[in-house]
Amino acid sequence: MKHHDCDFSPLKLKLKEQLTAISGEITKFLGALDNEGYCLLSEFAAIRGKFAKMESIASSFYLYCYLSPFTDKYVEISESVQHLSDRKHGALIVIERQDPLGPLLNQGTPLNATFTSSLLESIFYPGSPLHDGALLLRGDLIVSAAHILPLSIKKIESEHKLGTRHRAALGLTERSDALVIVVSEETGRASFALHGKLYPLNARELYY
């Protein structure tokens, strides 16, 4: 996939620095294996956490590359995702790219409003009549909300049980090139789905 002139240099530098640091820690752990009284379990947990953080940093950068050719509202979307994540307000945001999504969505509620962060966040405010469904963004326009998306039919191997929002995000992206951002109302964790795969996001590390 073409990444539309994204400059990967800052991302590569950041990841190289973190991988170098992790490599140093692994070297220390190898030396500690000779010490029978030394338990490495906590170190394994720490390394897993660092790899997870690296994945979320990379995902945030790639999200920018995937979205920037299709909407000028990336910064506002990123800020809204961070706010929704902080407040644990569940959200399902569909960004239409090249594939028309009309045949895959139920009618929803038409809005046809220019995107603003405050409008998006109000739609997903708990108790809002539109907050349970998916919002459709086309370019800089919030086309509609309260859509029901097709659920994924794949067996998903995950250490965390996926809720309906995540299964819906996967289901739509299995059938189209749409990108879907999900915020969990249980944990506040943000992620995005693309081509039937789910990627974690660190809402505070979004690239803008």
Image (tube, rainbow, N blue to C red):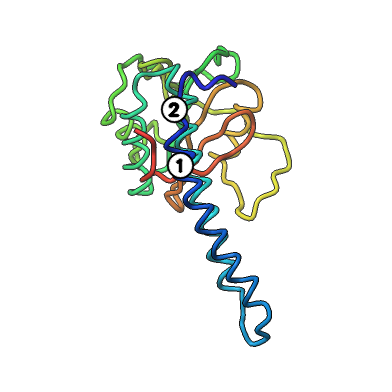
The vertical placement of 94 against 90, above or below, is above
Question: Which residue is the site of mark 2?
Answer: 7
Q: Can residue 200 be seen in this view?
A: yes
Residue at screen point 38% across, 43% down: 205
Residue at screen point 60% across, 65% down: 26
User: Which structural element holds mark 2?
Assistant: loop
Q: Residue 189's spot in the image, x, y percent?
A: 45, 48
Q: Residue 98's spot in the image, x, y percent?
A: 54, 13
Please tell me which residue lies in front, 133 or 21. Answer: 21
The vertical placement of 5 against 187, above or below, is above
Please tell me which residue lies in front, 207 or 5. Answer: 5
Residue at screen point 47% across, 29% down: 134
* Label 2 to label 1: alpha-carbon separation: 11 Å
Instruction: Give amino acid for label 1.
Output: Leu
- Determine the image quadrant of residue 102: top right
Q: Is residue 146 visible?
A: no
Residue at screen point 73% across, 42% down: 155
The quadrant of the image that shows the N terminus is top right
Question: Which residue is the site of mark 1?
Answer: 13
Instruction: Name the disc covering residue 51, or none.
Output: none
Q: How crowded is mark 2: few (under 14 residues within 10 Å), some or many (20 or more)?
A: few
The vertical placement of 34 against 121, above or below, is below
- Determine the image quadrant of residue 128: top left
Q: Residue 181's spot in the image, x, y percent?
A: 48, 34
Q: Residue 9's spot in the image, x, y percent?
A: 45, 34
**Sequence-earlier tag: 2 or 1:** 2
- Determine the image quadrant of residue 89: top left
User: Which structural element holds mark 1?
Assistant: helix
